């Protein structure tokens, strides 16, 4: 389970440190790799542990090649998937296509989203967090 918000930087080569808390959670779960892909709801990179990616992969592969809606989503979001390793310093290399999509510049924010992690440009994250959630869109996770 990933939760919390962590500010980091990304270098010109696209390397950014995965927060220690997230690295520890991956290690405890025996997860060696992450899969990075475009996030469909806003400009962010979604990072999935390999086991979560495998579950998603089964659903993607079960879709009909004649289902135009599903195929558009696969083309848009999952064709950009990249499996990445953490280097010895706990950094991940974010591929250029994903850096461009998420508009990642110098300051980035890692956000734990339960089973997944999201990586935002700091400005994009701040803008997203300033948006109000309409009362009808608030989800009651306790009810």
Image (tube, rainbow, N blue to C red):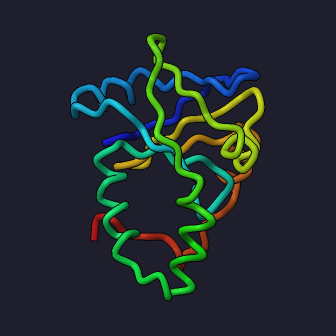
Residue 86 % position (x, y) = 45, 23
Residue 87 % position (x, y) = 47, 17
Q: Is residue 99 above or below residue 9?
A: below
Residue 91 % position (x, y) = 52, 21
Residue at 68% over, 27% down: 14
Occupied quadrant, residue 34: top left
Residue 120 % position (x, y) = 64, 42
Most foreground residue, 98 or 130: 98
In which quadrant is the N terminus drawn?
top left
Most foreground residue, 58 or 24: 58
Residue at 63% over, 65% down: 76
Occupied quadrant, residue 35: top left
Q: Is residue 121 above or below residue 39?
A: above
Q: Is residue 125 left or right of residue 57?
A: right
Q: Is residue 65 above or below residue 44?
A: below
Q: Residue furthest top?
A: 88
Q: Residue furthest front?
A: 65
Residue at 53% over, 27% down: 92
Q: Is residue 67 left or right of residue 55?
A: right
Q: Is residue 72 left or right of residue 142?
A: right
Occupied quadrant, residue 56: bottom left
In which quadrant is the C terminus drawn?
bottom left
């Amino acid at each position: 389970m990933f939760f919390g918000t962590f500010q980091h930087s990304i270098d010109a080569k696209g390397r950014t440190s995965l927060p220690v808390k997230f690295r520890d959670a991956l290690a405890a779960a025996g997860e060696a790799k992450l899969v990075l892909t475009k996030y469909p709801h806003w400009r962010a990179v979604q990072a999935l542990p390999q086991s979560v990616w495998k579950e998603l992969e089964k659903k993607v592969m079960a879709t009909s090649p004649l289902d135009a809606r599903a195929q558009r989503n696969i083309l848009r979001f999952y064709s950009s998937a990249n499996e990445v390793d953490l280097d010895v310093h706990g950094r991940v290399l974010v591929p250029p296509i994903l850096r461009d999509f998420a508009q990642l510049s110098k300051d980035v924010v890692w956000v734990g989203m339960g089973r997944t992690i999201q990586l935002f440009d700091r400005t994009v994250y701040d803008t997203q967090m300033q948006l109000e959630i309409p009362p009808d869109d608030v989800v009651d996770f306790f009810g």
